[in-house]
Image (spheres, helix red, strand yellow):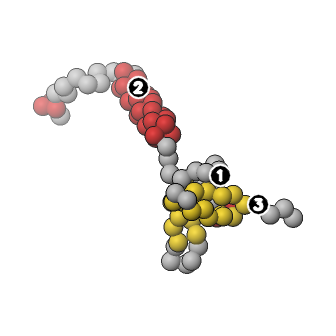
Amino acid sequence: MRKMRTTARIKPGRFLAIPLIALKRPHVSAGDQVDVTVTAHGRIEVTKVLTPAEKRIIDFRERLRVGSQRRRFALSLAAIPNAGEDDDFSRV
C-alpha cells in the first residue's frame, strides 16, 4: 500500500503535512494556500484558498450560467402566444 501525502503552506515559513484523504478539494497541491478547519467531531477539513485568477474563472462561469438561464426563459416566453401582453380580466 502506498502512503500518499502532500505539503501545503498554511503560513509563511510553516508547513503542514496533510494526508490526501482529509482534503475536501483534491486539486490542492504542494505550496498552495489552504484553510484548515477542525470540526466538532475532530475531523480535519482542508480547503484551498482560491487565487484571484480562479475567482475570476468561477465568476465568469456563474455569469454564463445566469445568462443562459435568462435566454432560456425569454425563449420559453416567446413560445407562449400573447405572452407579455396585458391581459384583460374584465371579461372573466
Whether the residues at callouts 2 and 1 have beta carbons within 8 Å, the answer is no
Label located before the other in sequence (1 or 3): 3
The amino acid type found where label 3 is placed reads Met
Question: Which residue is disc 2 drawn over?
Answer: 71
Q: Secondary structure at mark 1?
A: loop
Judged by depth in the image, the label closer to the viewer, 3 or 2, is 3
Q: Is residue 17 above or below residue 80?
A: below
- Name the foreground residue: 16 vs 49: 16
At horizontal 69% and vertical 64% (from top left) the residue drawn is 19
At horizontal 33% and vertical 21% (from top left) the residue drawn is 81
Judge whether residue 58 can be spotted in this image: no
- Name the foreground residue: 81 vs 45: 45
User: Which corner quadrant holds the N terminus?
Assistant: bottom right
Instruction: Say which quarter of the image contains residue 77.
Output: top left
Q: Secondary structure at mark 2?
A: helix
Instruction: Say which quarter of the image contains residue 90.
Output: top left
Measured in 3D between alpha carbons, the distance from the residue under mark 1 to the one under mark 3, in whole angstroms, is: 12 Å
How packed mark 3 is, by other alpha carbons closer than 10 Å (few <14, some 14-19, many 20 or more), is few
How packed mark 2 is, by other alpha carbons closer than 10 Å (few <14, some 14-19, many 20 or more), is few
Measured in 3D between alpha carbons, the distance from the residue under mark 3 to the one under mark 2, in whole angstroms, is: 46 Å
- Name the foreground residue: 53 vs 74: 53
Measured in 3D between alpha carbons, the distance from the residue under mark 2 to the one under mark 1, in whole angstroms, is: 41 Å
